[in-house]
Amino acid sequence: MEEIVFYNPESQGEEKSNALNLGYATPIHTQTNVNGFRQASTYPNGAVITGTKQGDRVFVACKGKALIHVYTWGKEAPEQKIPVPEQLTCLTLVHNKEENVSDVDLGQDFIFEENEEFTKLPKFKIPYLLIGGGISGKLYTWELSSGLLLSVKEAHYQAPTVLKTTADNSYLVSAGKDARILVWKISDLVAFDSTEEKIIKPAHVISDHSLEITDMFINNNIAQDSKLYTVSKDSTIRVYSLFNFQLLSTFIVSGIVESIVVDSADRAIFIGLQNGNIRQIDLYEANKASNILEAKGGAGRILTLAEDHELKSTITYHAPHPVKRLALSLDGSLIISGDEKGRVVVSDIVSKQVVKELKEVTGSVANIQVLSSYQTAEDSVVEKNNRAMLPLKRVIASGELKEQEVIFQKGMDQDQELFNLDDYLQRVSSEALHFEGLSSVQSNAFGNVATSGDNAAMVKVLQEKNDKVTKAYADLRSMYEELYKEHTKLLEKK
């Protein structure tokens, strides 16, 4: 298994230079197979990637244009340029239920990819929804398999900065420059109400921050323990429970916070500061009296972090350039960071040392995503005849059934079965017999380890059986010889 880092730049405002801006997808642990994506400049959090297999796609919202560039994995140039109603400042995906195994960024296609080989499912797979935040503050929801625009919601007073979905794809969390955080039910964003005009409102509104929200993070725990981490230019980090939307903790730091990422086990928070430092905030500390780990914060506490003058919890590689984006490796041992200058590096969390420098991009780093990848000989070949995606509509769908036409590519002929019950039962029965045989061998081997008296009795019984079999074989052979002689005599008389 390899870990792939996808990252792309933010445009600098010059149209000619923007056309040459490259995004990259590169492995963390090796030096090969670096994929480039041309014209991939976007707003912060304005790009998403579905995976690293054949048929996977990259969606990039172009900065300064009402366009979405769609790339096929393995190809450098955009395959499609899809117009949208307005400029989109951030994007997120909602995956299909059968594809969504976990999040994110933890290899969300593990089980789906494994079953794909067994059931021969189609390689052409796209997520369920694409949600974008417009520069005017609106939220747009598209169904990718049909291209329908399902809803347009007046969400923020200013442009959204980041969109996140929960692990179970039930809620969408949007944050914007208006310092507000809105929690939406995804079922409300895709539902058609033909009986009456219903105004869809967010399930919850959070307005604790006083300045623009720069980044968010949602952990992948169970619903009762799901947490939302938000950072803002007001130098605060706030932790909320998504189960009841309560404010759990508030951390105050000295400096503007640009980005955030949280350890998968909720052991530490990593923040990128405007002064170029990456600060680690441990969420558990040992009690000096009892030497027992205790959680920091909780119950609405406000904690002010002291300056780390000894740099025990700080990475200073990017200083003085602001750290725009952060991501963690799958095991949480490495942190990938990108700054305003375009530098992207991989650092070891324990030693705080840089272990690898990735290709530099032109301009500020806008997005960093880490994905898992199982590369095979088949995956290394790029398909030339991929089915193009349907264009995204710019008018809200009416909800009529005739418009709900979904285009997909089937994986096999209709007379072939995806699952054969008889073969499955036969395979299970053979495995059961195999394990029963192994268990009997183990029991006999265990039974042989007995006392000398038991061994002698067993040898005596086996010797008696052997003598009986030997005597029966001798009698049978003598009878056969006599019959053969009689047969020979009859032939001679003839």
Image (spheres, helix red, strand yellow):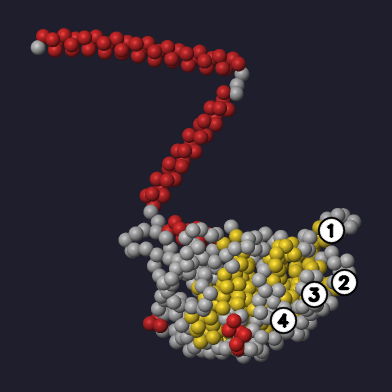
Earlier sequence position, callout 3 versus callout 1:
1
Q: Secondary structure at mark 1?
A: strand
Mark earlier in primary sequence (2, 4): 4
Look at the picture and state if 335 lies above or below 163: above
Residue 198 visible in the current orientation: no
Residue matched to label 2: 307
Q: Is residue 489 left or right of residue 345?
A: left
Counting residues from the start of the chain, the first of labels 3 and 4 encountered is 4
Q: Residues within 10 Å of mark 1 (few under 14, many from 20)?
A: few
Q: Residues within 10 Å of mark 4 (few under 14, many from 20)?
A: many
**For the residues marked 1 and 2, what is the alpha-carbon distance in whole angstroms?**
20 Å
Task: Give percent across and percent down for residue 190.
Answer: 51, 79
At numbered mark 4, what does the secondary structure look like: helix, strand or loop? Answer: strand
Mark 3 — residue?
A: 319
- Disc nearest the viewer among 2 and 3: 3
Whichever of callouts 1 and 2 sits on the residue coming sooner in the sequence is: 1
Q: Which residue is mark 1?
A: 286
Residue lying at the far left in this picture: please name it.
494
Residue displayed at 62% across by 90% down: 136
Q: Amino acid at mark 1?
A: Ala
Quadrant in the picture for the C terminus:
top left
| Residue occupying image coordinates x 19% and y 9% | 486
Q: Around disc 3, counting alpha carbons within 10 Å, would you say few (fewer than 14), some (14 to 19), or many (20 or more)? A: some
Q: Closer to us: mark 3 or mark 1?
A: 3
Q: Amino acid at mark 3?
A: Ala
Mark-to-mark CA distance, 2 and 3? 16 Å
